[in-house]
Amino acid sequence: MTENLGSLTTESVEQRFSRIDMLDTRSLVALINDQDATVAGAVAAQLDAVAAAVDLIVAGLGAGGRLVYAGAGTAGRLGVLDASECPPTFNTEPSMVVGLIAGGQVALTTAVEGAEDDAEGSFPQLDELAVGEQDVVVGISASGRTPYAVGAVTEARRRGARTVGLSCNAGSALGAAADVAIEVVVGPEVVAGSTRLKSGTAQKLVLNTLTTASMVKLGKTYGNLMVDVRASNEKLRDRTHRIVTAATDASPEAVTAALQEHGGRAKPAILALLTGWSADEVAAALEASDGHLRRAVDASLPHPGQDM
């Protein structure tokens, strides 16, 4: 990774921003906001690649594999963040979506000098996870040349895993190493080289999309309702009640009773209220549909010609 870093879009110095230290506060925050507004368009230009990555992830997770993020610095932290939000949102096992960061867990809050430059730094982490053919490894690097991320994708691919490279420079080494390259070119940062700005925002948008779209396709929602939400606190218990109400239009009393019968879980409570089935029938239907509530509901409906 010896190419001139100054040639990278993410490292370039934009003369338009050369006097930001002389701006009044309102003008400064407006400039940052104006630049942030360009990020969604840059992501939109990569939607074909994002969709291809989602299909890889769905295939891997559907076969019992895992989604593994690997990055350094801000990129690594964003991967860990996205992974950590999946269990409470979609009731996934913590091992289903995993975030690896150069330098280990301490690097989440403290810079670990030189960790990102170790091309083999992820190898022990991949070994510990026993990454293999059913897994999907997403390397994340704003520059697209971070040795840790490129090494993680290269090694994962050697192991037979599906791979994705997420960067903010076109023609990146990371993209070349992966099965699918997502290269969101957001242009120079307001503070030159500070890739926690637009680049970080772009990576956050893409990572949100990868997991959200994948979980939707895996049946973790019913319409746009988070029916697999883990009701681990009062706010989420209230949300679960509202989700079941929205899906069934049942009375508050009926929703409360259904949730109590089904251990506070929205998905079986909804199916029970929509069908009138017993707890055993609901459990059997959800197992037969691989946990897809929509499939279970559709299967409960009369077919054409069937007696009502």
Image: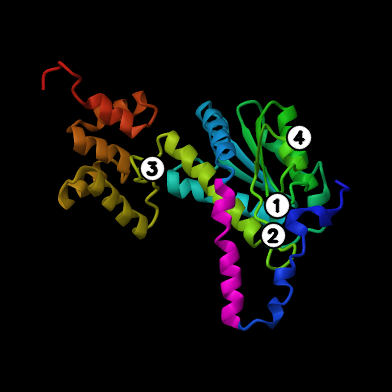
Mark 4 residue element: helix
Residue labelled with disc 2: 195
**As shown in the figure, which amino acid type bears the numbered disc 4?**
Thr
Kindly report the distance in space between the C-alpha atoms of the residues bearing marks 3 and 1.
32 Å
Kindly report the distance in space between the C-alpha atoms of the residues bearing marks 2 and 3.
34 Å
**Percent x, y for residue 55?**
53, 31
Is disc 4 in contact with disc 3, using a CB cutoff of under 8 Å? no
**Percent x, y for residue 189?**
69, 63
In the image, residue 174 lies in the stretch drawn in magenta: no
**Badge 4 or badge 3: first in the primary sequence:** 4
Which labelled disc corresponds to residue 228?
3
Q: Which residues are magenta?
A: 25-44
The quadrant holding residue 263 is top left
Q: Nearer the viewer, mark 4 or mark 3?
A: 4
User: Could you tell whether 13 is left or right of 292 in the image?
Assistant: right
**As shown in the figure, which amino acid type bears the numbered disc 3?**
Asp
Kindly report the distance in space between the C-alpha atoms of the residues bearing marks 2 and 1.
7 Å
In the image, residue 26 lies in the stretch drawn in magenta: yes
Q: Residue at x 86, y 52 (%)?
A: 4
Mark 3 residue element: loop
**As shown in the figure, which amino acid type bears the numbered disc 1?**
Ala
**Badge 2 or badge 1: first in the primary sequence:** 1
Residue labelled with disc 1: 142
Residue labelled with disc 4: 154
**Badge 2 or badge 4: first in the primary sequence:** 4
Is disc 1 in contact with disc 4, using a CB cutoff of under 8 Å? no
Is disc 2 in contact with disc 1, using a CB cutoff of under 8 Å? yes
